[in-house]
Amino acid sequence: MAIRLTRSIVPNLLTLANLFCGFVSIIYSSNGEYTQAAMFILLGAFFDMFDGITARLVNAASEFGVELDSLCDTVSFGLAPSYMLYQAAFSTSGELGILFASFPALAGAVRLARFNVTLTSLDDKAYFIGLPIPSSALVIVSYIVFIQQSGKYDPTTVLYLNYIVPAIVSLVMVSNIKFDNMPRPTKKYIKEKPFFLIIFVISIILVILSEGEYLFPVMFFWIIFSSIKHFLHWVLSKRIPEEDLSDEGDDSFSQQYDID
């Protein structure tokens, strides 16, 4: 029987490459080689970014691809970072450490399930509801590498951060906070959102110049910035008098306050 190759083979292979990277990362974490483990999660994020791009380029986006991508993401960006967190920060913390280390994996599974059931289009999106699981993985692994490489914090501070960081990351994953997608180098995007593009470029430069050490501060700043932006939108929405809402409707409200 001949094997029939379809256009979806390339994006699906990229998705499986992401899963393979997550598997290798777990092996490195089990050996205490956290920098290498982090590098394979970063490589997995690279494959995860390009599988969707490739699928759209060859017109091979499908529900199967979405489901496969979510299954692979659960391992590479949920289980692998949680296991790395446990090995690096909680291996001597007993049951409480196991619980906190599991948060990113558990929240990531919920995040992906919600994404799949609410998916209405296979097109690229301008924003995500809740922190995307690849981004959460980058926060977790960059935090571990940052703490180990910087050596600037006393053990008590590190102990508190070990609990605070995964808790915050897990909460924003399952939240309703809007997180902008990566900036697009198009004329339309540059014209509409030049500030975000400038911040993105500066962040990339900082990460490169610091040889990856500033990836965690940059990623955490993105979480804080997006959360503040979401809160300000919520506050502004509460300032609209109820009678104005009933008279003008939701469309005029969105236009007045530029709510996405």
Image: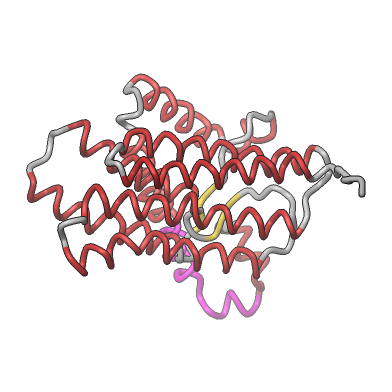
Chain part drawn in magenta: 230-247
* Residue 28 falls in image quadrant: top left
Q: Residue at x 34, y 63 (%)?
A: 102
Q: Residue at x 48, y 32 (%)?
A: 200
Left or right, 65 with respect to 140, comes to right
Q: Residue at x 75, y 39 (%)?
A: 10
Q: How is the image coloured?
A: secondary structure
Determine if the magenta segment contains residue 240. Answer: yes
Q: Is residue 244 above or below residue 54?
A: below
- x then y, percent, for residue 39: 42, 34
Left or right, 114 with respect to 136, comes to right
In the image, farthest residue toward the front: 1
Left or right, 146 with respect to 13, comes to left
Q: Name the foreground residue: 97 vs 2.
A: 2
Magenta region's main secondary structure?
helix
- x then y, percent, for residue 58: 82, 39
Left or right, 87 with respect to 124, comes to left
Q: Name the foreground residue: 182 vs 144.
A: 144
Q: Is residue 210 above or below residue 140?
A: above
Q: Is residue 226 above or below residue 117?
A: above
Q: Residue at x 33, y 44 (%)?
A: 29
- x then y, percent, for residue 146: 26, 36
- x then y, percent, for residue 237: 49, 67
Q: Name the foreground residue: 222 vs 84.
A: 84
Q: Is residue 18 above or below residue 194?
A: below
Determine if the magenta segment contains residue 243. Answer: yes
In the image, farthest residue toward the top: 209
Q: Quadrant of the C terminus?
A: bottom right
* Residue 94 falls in image quadrant: bottom left
